[in-house]
Image: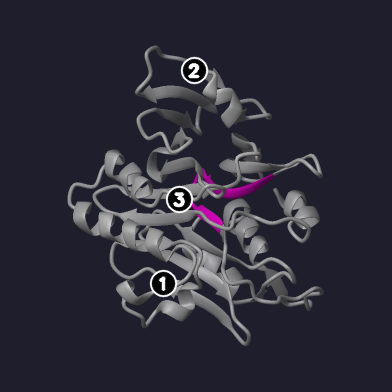
């Protein structure tokens, strides 16, 4: 994934919406709603990288004819969701030798790490910075119950640690809202943030796949342009990802990382499956399965 970001992330914009979360109940679940304009295609893929397999969801940049991943999980259960942080903060056009853009943390967490300890070790050696015209933050979680939200500060890295059994990230700056009651938080995604937290609190006992999707359904973006185009649920211990598209939670696909395959899972009239080659499968192609 490295070359994709190195070339493009300074030139393109990622979703100005999206919701990501991690929850540690009887089982571990990660989730992400991808909210993006309808003209942008989305692709799901399982590919090989340095030390194993990685699932990623990418969106297509037509101007540059390339796919850009925004959320991923590797076979060790490291989950990373890269989302727009609003409002934009003027970043660094030319980072210093010890500075790293937020998207570089995304790459490192997925390509090089198997635990949060390794992620934190990387963060401790660098100063995280924003790109000049694009402000991002990142949710990272592992299978041990450790999760963080990382944001770039002016003088230091801003790391928000999970407290309790879940953590949620939308688009407002999390570090600025740590001491504000949930009901008084303002900014882009505040309502989606509250909706997700409320669902988690009400359904934590016996939390299963249905509840994992319910959390995302509660946080769906209904904006006319930036609506929820795809939702993904991650079962890291079984290296499985569940997918639904177009805010339709009545039809769910299942992706096996081990088998590099996708199959109908719930809500379909007939069963269907296919292997995922290097091209993956797009939302447009999945619609043909309906």
**In this view, the mark in front (3 or 1):** 3
Which stretch did the figure color magenta? 68-82
Residue count near mark 1 (Cα–Cα under 10 Å), binned few <14, some 14–19, many ≥20: some
Q: Which residue is mark 1?
A: 161
Residue farthest along the front direction in this orientation:
224
Left/right of residue 43 with respect to residue 243 in the rendered view = right
Placement of 172 over or under 210, stated as above or below = below
The location of residue 183, given as percent across then percent down, is 31, 72
| Foreground residue among 194 and 130 | 194
Residue farthest along the left direction in this orientation:
205
**Real-space CA distance between mark 1 and mark 2, rounded to the nearest whole angstrom:** 39 Å
Q: Residue at x 47, y 77 (%)?
A: 175
| Foreground residue among 75 and 131 | 131
The location of residue 69, given as percent across then percent down, is 64, 47
Placement of 67 over or under 137, stated as above or below = above
Q: Secondary structure at mark 2?
A: strand
Q: Which residue is mark 3?
A: 221
Residue 271 lies within the magenta run: no
The disc at residue 273 is 2
Location of residue 178 (image quadrant): bottom left
The location of residue 55, given as percent across then percent down, is 55, 40
């Amino acid at each position: 994934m490295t070359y994709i970001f190195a070339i493009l992330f300074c030139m393109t914009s990622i979703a100005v919406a999206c919701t990501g979360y991690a929850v540690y109940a009887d089982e571990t679940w990660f989730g992400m709603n991808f909210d993006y304009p309808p003209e942008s295609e989305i692709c799901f893929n399982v590919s090989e990288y340095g030390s194993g397999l990685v699932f990623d969801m990418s969106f297509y940049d037509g101007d540059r004819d390339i796919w850009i991943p925004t959320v991923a999980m590797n076979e060790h259960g490291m989950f990373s969701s890269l989302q727009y942080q609003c409002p934009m903060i003027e970043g660094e056009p030319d980072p210093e030798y010890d500075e790293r853009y937020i998207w570089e943390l995304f790459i490192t967490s997925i390509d090089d790490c198997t635990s949060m300890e390794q992620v934190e070790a990387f963060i401790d050696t660098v100063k995280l910075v924003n790109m000049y015209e694009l402000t991002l933050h990142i949710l990272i979680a592992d299978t041990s119950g450790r999760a963080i939200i990382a944001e770039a500060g002016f003088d230091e890295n801003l790391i928000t640690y999970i407290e309790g059994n879940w953590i949620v990230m939308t688009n407002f700056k999390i570090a600025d809202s740590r001491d504000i009651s949930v009901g008084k938080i303002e900014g882009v995604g505040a309502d989606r943030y509250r909706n997700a937290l409320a669902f988690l609190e009400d359904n934590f006992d016996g939390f299963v796949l249905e509840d994992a999707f319910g959390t995302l359904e509660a946080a769906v973006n209904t904006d006319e342009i930036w609506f929820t185009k795809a939702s993904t649920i991650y079962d890291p211990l079984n290296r499985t990802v569940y997918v639904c598209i177009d805010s339709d939670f009545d039809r769910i696909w299942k992706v096996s990382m081990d088998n590099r395959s996708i199959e109908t899972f719930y809500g379909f009239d007939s069963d269907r499956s296919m292997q995922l080659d290097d091209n993956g499968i797009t939302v447009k192609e999945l619609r043909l399965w309906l």
